[in-house]
Image: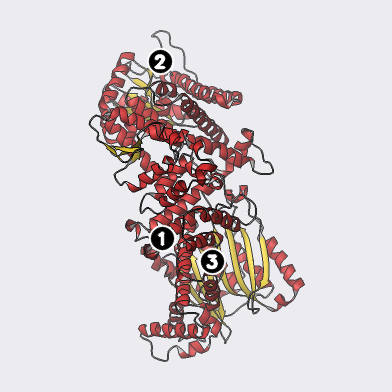
Amino acid sequence: MPDVVIESATPGMHTPPRPVTALRQDYLAGKAALQARFANPSASAPLLRKLARLTDQTLAELWNRHRFPVEALLIAVGGYGRGELFPHSDVDLLILLPDQPSPALLEKLEIFVGELWDVGLEVGHSVRTLADCLNEAEKDITVQTALLECRRLTGDAARFTQFRDTVHRYIDPKEFFDAKLLEQQARYGRFQNATYKLEPNLKEAPGGLRDLHLVGWIAAALGLGRDWRALAALGMLTREESQKLRRAERTLRVIRIQLHWLAKRREDRILFDYQNTLARDFGFHDDLVNRGSERLMAHYYRAARIVSQLTPLLVHALRGRIFSQIGVKVVPLNARFQLRGSVLETTAPDIFQREPSAILELFLLFEQQREITDIAPETLRALWHARAQIDDGFRANPLNKLLFIQLFREPRGLTRVLRRMNQYGVLGRYIPKFGDLVGRMQHDLFHVYTVDEHTLMVLRNMRRFAVPAFTHEYPLCSRLIEEFARPEVLYLAALFHDIGKGRGGDHSKIGRDIAAEFVNGHPLPNEDREIIPWLVEHHLTMSHVAQKQDVYDPEVVQEFATLVGDQRRLTALYLLTVADIRGTSPKVWNAWKAKLLEDLFKATQRYLAQDQIQPATWLEERQDEALRLVRLYGLREDAHQDFWNELDTVYFLRHDAREIAWHTRMLFNRLHTKEPVVRARLSESGEGLQVLVYTPDIPDLFARICAFFERAGYSIFDAHIHTTRSRYALDSFYVFIPEQRGENYRDLIGYVEYELGKQLQEAGPLPAPVKARISRQQKHFPVQPHVLIRPDERGKYNVLAIAAGDRPGLLSTIARVLAAHRVDIQSAKIMTLGERAEDHFLISGPILGDDMAVRRMENELLQAIQPN
């Protein structure tokens, strides 16, 4: 966009300025008119230019009101400096002065800037001299970047040209290039290097508009311009690539334009709140297979993928213009590949066409040669255009099968290689059913990635266990994977664990069959051909047992151990489970789940090692360990006796030795207290509190405790409910406290012990459940509530399974219904998966023997947990 020159009013021709309110009306009316006329997505660039021109005109009138000195320059910088303006983007301005402003000029400038906001312009501005600009640019690469994209709005053209030339001379292309790539690396890190998130940021995330800007900035620093056609004319892009990149940019731009208008503010995340409306705006409607929003997101993912494929080629080409290749040593690796410096390249441009196996060999060399830092752009381009070579014949070739499996056997680089293979379409071509998952959304309220992105995150987590630098994160996982023979089993299981999604039916069983077909056709030992499909089929089993059953119950451990069968499968399933949960969403994984899984793993390991420990032996050993811990508290030898006489076998089976010892220490001299005893301590998992409640039993006790925690903003994620022989309630709760900090946990403990004890002692009316609005995710992807009551496997209790959208007050609402029917809760497993609650209760009561009464209670519960 050419410079827009705002002329000062001629002396003697002064026209009274219009009121700011009139300017505001005209500006907003102009934006509304542009929005109303915007019907053709291909016209996104003209719209952005028109919005910039409208802003230019408004600035012109405001600037002229103040008769600023002729030496002052008003300069557009940043995106506005490019001559583009999105509907709610900032208007970035630089007011350039010849020297430091006087107080009078500063006052005029403050009034001017205030008027900009009054008019409705969202302004980012700075007032600087040339020396100030250069000083700030030296300290901040973002200032250099903004000054690169500057456009004169007012002032002397010669002075502006001098300013622009000075800025360009000041910028060192080599330093600028390195700094921008470091900036990109940090930006990618904020988005976990993931292109395919379910609510992506189309500006900042990998594959977004910022990647296109990066190419433009580097090209501008070299004086090459930023137009794709210009870069293609320089040989950096083919005509086809240039067209694809322009289409991808247009897609990202028009979605961002519509987002701004929908949100009525600057919004660059394609949130669930907007996806359905955006889909309708783009003509995507629901059909029998996909939602309109899924088709919209597939449209976005295609554009982001093109950007992530092609912009690295341009960055590499620009690197070649900045950094001389003269004198760079070329080292042959074999007949097909060579190393130029630290960059891997082919020895001939048509090598992939002549020898298709070189496609996989390229990635294997990338893993094996530690000195390789990157792949040459010409090689990546040739690879991208050679994808069609990966067909049935390619997949049937024994050499290619061997090369693919070898990728998983290398000690380093697998995650990086698989991401590259997915980025350039190689992985989806070699495993077509994986290709079907690329960009597939998951509307389950706890995954934040598409299926393929989640899969690669799981695989990354698995590889992270094997990296010595990360052993502090999960020491047990790191030790286990170090001792695991042929760890490629784990990585292949991670790659296939969700491959059955989107095909109808149980994705675990469908995935098992797909994995079995794959491994049976590849060079793997028979044992590994059996364990990989088994892991795919059971990849959810261990988390279900840990989070829905009592991992301290010997019968639960025995049943799980029978399923697992041996130590190798147990280890593999544990590692896959941890990696899988951590790869769904930051909200899903927590220290409590980590502890449950680890405790289940260790109990099962012990069971397998000692060849089926009998429950009686298990109970005896647990009591002996609890007694040993009690003695460490300094209590007398028989201090535990009266307290333990109040407890039955079920109590000892449901609590571990450390918890039994703590209860004993707290209660051995308070067995018949009339006042509630509430004690709390920091959870052994290091996250949240463990709370003990001991009090004469009352029917609505569980509901009262839940109501207290909910009103305090604490989340219960596990509860053990027990009644002693003397009809005292002995309940243990594990609660999570948001933003809990180690240095103040004593205050939290004091608060819980005093306030909960006081409320239980006063025993006033049961407070109303906490009411809260449902989250925006549930609003757009609601959870269908589900309630089921069934006898447990032993026939002594019943299991109540509830699934619903999570919200404050849900647990106490459930407890109220159960209390009204005089149903006792024996234990509660509270599992939250993002916005979805899956709660399991072990319950007892006379009503549970009457089928009709059970159905009525199920209906009451179903009505009670419906969203507000």
- In the image, 799 versus 466, the foreground residue is 466
Which amino acid type is shown beneath numbered disc 3?
Answer: Gln
Q: Which residue is mark 3?
A: 547
Tell me the element at label 1: loop
Secondary structure found at label 2 = loop
Count neighbours of disc 2 (C-alpha within 10 A) and say few if under 14, some if 14 to 19, many if 20 or more: some
**What amino acid type is highlighted by mark number 1?**
Arg
Crowd rating for badge 3 (residues with CA inside 10 Å; few <14, some 14–19, many 20+): many
> Which is nearer the eye, 570 or 822?
570
- Residue plotted at (54% across, 30% down): 254
Marking on residue 428:
none
Q: CA distance from mark 3 to mark 2?
A: 67 Å
Q: Separation of disc 3 and disc 1 at Cα? A: 29 Å
Circle nearer the N terminus (3, 2): 2
Question: Which SS class for mark 3?
Answer: helix
The correct choice, above or below, for 756 with respect to 345 in the image is below
Residue identifier under label 2: 5
